[in-house]
Image (tube, rainbow, N blue to C red):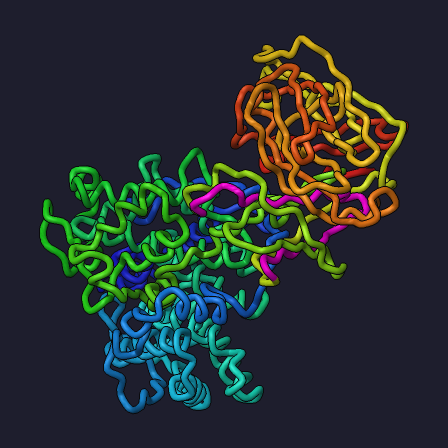
């Protein structure tokens, strides 16, 4: 494959004896692509010019609300799939399709042996290395047997994978590069490293699935991992040598993805964070219409290279998602991965969409027709399953109801089902076997807390799950606790087929103490969420007798102001005033109905509510608990959460109820809430809501220092939290 890119520009400069330019070029590359280690930044270049001239610096110190250094590897044993869960899913959902989707023979006719390849010999930087075909055979063997192992767990396949990798490790394969001085700088090594990258992504993915197999000895595992560590380390080293450069375009994304995958298996937090950082860089690089400037400039190859970027970006997005980070929600000026996919689909449907860019560097394309024709071959018509569109299996499984997914299902000319399995090394292997028929956890979702979030006061552990008998949570190493499940969630109907899927658990974060904590959530005993979050406590588990009200300027926009007020029942601040007009009012004033066997704890009479909050309390004996807001229909809410503080009154502890509610949907003004146990009303209160003019405020940010709270000379910091649609306490001094 011909790749005239920044790297080729450098190689040509050297080969033309422009040696005296090389230090200048290295300085340019260092300034262009090196992250600033003091205030985390990255250099992004649009293209399509080579070398790129339109570069700019972005701040990567916080990504999707999480500080760069807070991204942590949560599971070293899982890259793209959880082996046991996926194996069971295939048996349960696709027993008749497993052989077609996952068997070795569905991709290759395997050879008896794949002998180690020691040398990688590349005669120049514009053509394939001499071992190219043999290395591709090895790569496809790893892809095919990896999927087979995932589905069938046969002794024969496990032994073939392990013995082959061990043989390569003991032979120190891929260690000789004629003409190169490995470890030195100023090397013309792009082709050698690029060749390794194409092989190693599926090798690392397959290894992640077999590395804990009981048939693998500890000694053999160490040998294989030592070999992989060396080979991956060299393959992901900067082009040109340790002090070389990172390709700013599609190959740079491939490198970060490989490094991220191997880093996860080693528990390397930096490699994970740098992969996520690269996705952010890609969104900055992307045009508003979803096109990647450098890639779509490449003549008849424009669609192929737009698709290549998607392969690399979605591979990293899936790695991040499996570690508990929702990178698909990452947005830069409303540009997301979904937008990039939509552009690809539009370009295929209407070539004029991409032709306006494709002539900018039309000669930088190989194995393709002449413009205005566009090479769509391995995008819409895979070659024996090999497809640049292999990422679509993960996307369709994760977003089955997204408009892009309905279009992707008809993308392949022979139809998706008739084309399966599909694979690509950049996607880690046989994506059909990895993802087809899977919901990728979308049947269960922990919405709060999120990984890396800040929590304070009395909050809610909340989310939804489509089908479960019971839901449990575990905080740190405390015992598991069952939480109320079955709340009405109309937004889950499309995914679940019904709406009684919400779960919620009221929790006083102050009881944990200031610091980082861990939460795991289980459905019928099976874990589906594992997050770390930070708590800030104001020295007491329940702060009493304090008050405070503060004006926060220029929020949510410059020139707008809000007021926050301390709320003791919430153990937090709520928004009590904003530059908004009342949109609804309740003229009558009511008082709570007293009951010794039931209590509505929040909201309280005349309280202020804002953002996403919790309607909570307890009832000693009930089959059902319902609430009614204003004149809306009654809503059934989850009941039965553990509340040990009710034992003295009720005689047991499974009495809590909780319901997540976005107060913004009511509009600014006074509203009324009634609560019922088995149809009998036990509470009737009015409360005030303040909104910021939107039901769900997006892309806002703000941090404010409040002085003399909760006592004189003490200070706290409030930070806007989008998932809470409110401020949380992020610091206390």
> In this view of the protein, can residue 640 be seen by the observer?
yes
Q: Residue at x 55, y 88 (%)?
A: 217
User: Which of the two residues, 79 or 31, is positioned nearer the viewer here?
Assistant: 79
Query: Residue 545 location in percent, x, y?
Result: 90, 27
Magenta stretch, main secondary structure, is strand
- Above or below: residue 450 compared with residue 711: below
In what quadrant of the picture does the N terminus appear? Answer: bottom left
Q: Image quarter for residue 650? A: top right
Magenta segment boundaries in residue numbering: 496-524
Nearer the observer, 688 or 250: 688
Quarter-of-image position of residue 559: top right
Please provide percent x and percent y for residue 113.
31, 90
Residue 247: image x %, image y %?
38, 56
Residue 215 covered by magenta stretch: no
Nearest the camera: 213 or 285? 213
Q: Position of residue 690 (x, y in %)?
A: 64, 19
Does residue 510 show up magenta in the picture?
Answer: yes
Quadrant in which residue 563 is drawn? top right
Q: Give the residue displayed 17% in from the left and 40% down from the top.
A: 350
The residue closer to the viewer here, 380 or 90, is 90
In the picture, which quadrant includes the C terminus?
Answer: top right
Q: Is residue 722 left or right of residue 382?
A: right
């Amino acid at each position: 494959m011909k790749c005239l890119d920044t790297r080729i520009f450098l190689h040509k400069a050297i080969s033309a004896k422009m040696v005296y330019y090389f230090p200048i070029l290295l300085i340019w590359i260092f300034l262009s692509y090196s992250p600033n280690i003091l205030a985390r930044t990255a250099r992004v270049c649009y293209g399509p010019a080579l070398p790129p001239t339109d570069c700019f610096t972005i701040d990567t110190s916080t990504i999707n609300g999480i500080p760069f250094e807070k991204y942590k590897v949560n599971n070293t044993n899982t890259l793209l799939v959880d082996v046991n869960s996926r194996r069971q899913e295939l048996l349960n959902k696709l027993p008749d399709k497993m052989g077609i989707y996952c068997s070795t023979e569905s991709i290759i006719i395997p050879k008896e042996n794949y002998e180690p390849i020691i040398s990688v010999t590349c005669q120049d930087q514009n053509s394939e290395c001499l071992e190219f075909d043999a290395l591709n055979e090895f790569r496809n063997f790893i892809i095919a047997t990896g999927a087979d192992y995932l589905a069938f767990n046969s002794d024969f396949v496990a032994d073939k994978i392990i013995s082959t990798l061990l043989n390569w490790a003991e032979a120190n394969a891929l260690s000789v590069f004629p003409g190169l001085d490995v470890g030195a700088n100023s090397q013309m090594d792009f082709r050698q490293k690029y060749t390794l990258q194409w092989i190693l992504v599926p090798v690392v993915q397959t290894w992640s699935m077999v590395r804990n197999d009981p048939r693998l000895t500890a000694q053999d595992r160490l040998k294989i991992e030592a070999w992989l560590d060396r080979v991956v380390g060299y393959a992901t080293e900067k082009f040109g040598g340790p002090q070389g450069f990172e390709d700013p375009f599609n190959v740079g994304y491939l490198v970060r993805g490989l490094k991220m995958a191997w880093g996860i298996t080693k528990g390397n937090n930096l490699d994970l964070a740098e992969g996520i950082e690269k996705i952010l860089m890609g969104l900055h690089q992307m045009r508003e219409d979803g096109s990647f400037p450098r890639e779509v400039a490449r003549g008849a190859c424009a669609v192929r290279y737009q698709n290549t970027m998607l392969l690399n970006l979605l591979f990293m997005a899936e790695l991040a998602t499996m570690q508990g980070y929702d990178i698909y929600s990452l947005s830069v000026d409303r540009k997301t991965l979904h937008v990039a996919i939509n552009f690809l689909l539009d370009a295929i449907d209407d070539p004029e969409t991409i032709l306006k860019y494709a002539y900018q560097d039309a000669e930088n394309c190989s194995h393709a027709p002449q413009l205005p024709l566009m090479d769509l071959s391995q995008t819409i018509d895979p070659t024996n399953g090999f497809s640049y569109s292999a990422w679509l299996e993960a996307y369709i499984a994760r977003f089955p109801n997204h408009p892009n997914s309905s279009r992707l299902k008809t993308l392949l000319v022979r139809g998706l089902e008739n084309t399966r399995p599909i694979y690509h090394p950049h996607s880690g292997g046989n994506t059909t076997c990895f993802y087809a028929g899977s919901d990728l956890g979308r049947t269960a979702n922990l919405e709060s807390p999120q990984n890396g979030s800040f929590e304070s006061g009395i909050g809610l552990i909340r989310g939804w799950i489509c089908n479960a008998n019971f839901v449990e949570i575990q905080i740190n190493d405390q015992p598991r606790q069952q939480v109320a499940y079955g709340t009405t969630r109309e937004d889950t109907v499309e995914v679940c087929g019904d709406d009684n899927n919400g779960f919620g658990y009221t929790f006083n974060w102050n009881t944990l103490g200031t610091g980082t904590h861990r939460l795991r959530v289980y459905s019928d005993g099976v874990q589906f969420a594992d997050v770390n979050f930070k708590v800030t406590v104001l020295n007491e588990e329940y702060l009493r007798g304090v008050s405070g009200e503060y004006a926060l300027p220029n929020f949510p926009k410059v020139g707008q102001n809000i007021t926050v007020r301390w709320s003791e029942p919430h153990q937090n601040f709520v928004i009590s005033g904003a530059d908004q007009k009342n949109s609804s009012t309740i003229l009558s004033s009511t008082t709570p109905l007293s009951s010794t066997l039931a209590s509505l704890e929040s909201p309280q009479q005349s309280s202020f509510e804002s953002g996403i909050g919790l309607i909570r309390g307890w009832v000693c004996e009930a089959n059902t608990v319902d609430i009614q807001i204003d004149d809306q229909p009654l809503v059934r809410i989850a009941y039965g959460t553990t509340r040990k503080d009710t034992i003295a009154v009720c005689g047991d502890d499974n009495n809590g109820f909780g319901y997540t509610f976005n107060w913004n949907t009511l509009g600014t003004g006074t509203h009324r809430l009634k609560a019922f146990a088995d149809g009998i009303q036990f509470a009737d209160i009015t409360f005030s809501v303040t909104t910021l003019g939107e039901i769900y405020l997006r892309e806002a940010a703000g941090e404010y220092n409040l002085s003399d709270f909760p006592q004189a000379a003490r200070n706290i910091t409030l930070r806007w939290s989008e998932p809470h649609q409110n401020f949380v306490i992020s610091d206390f001094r």
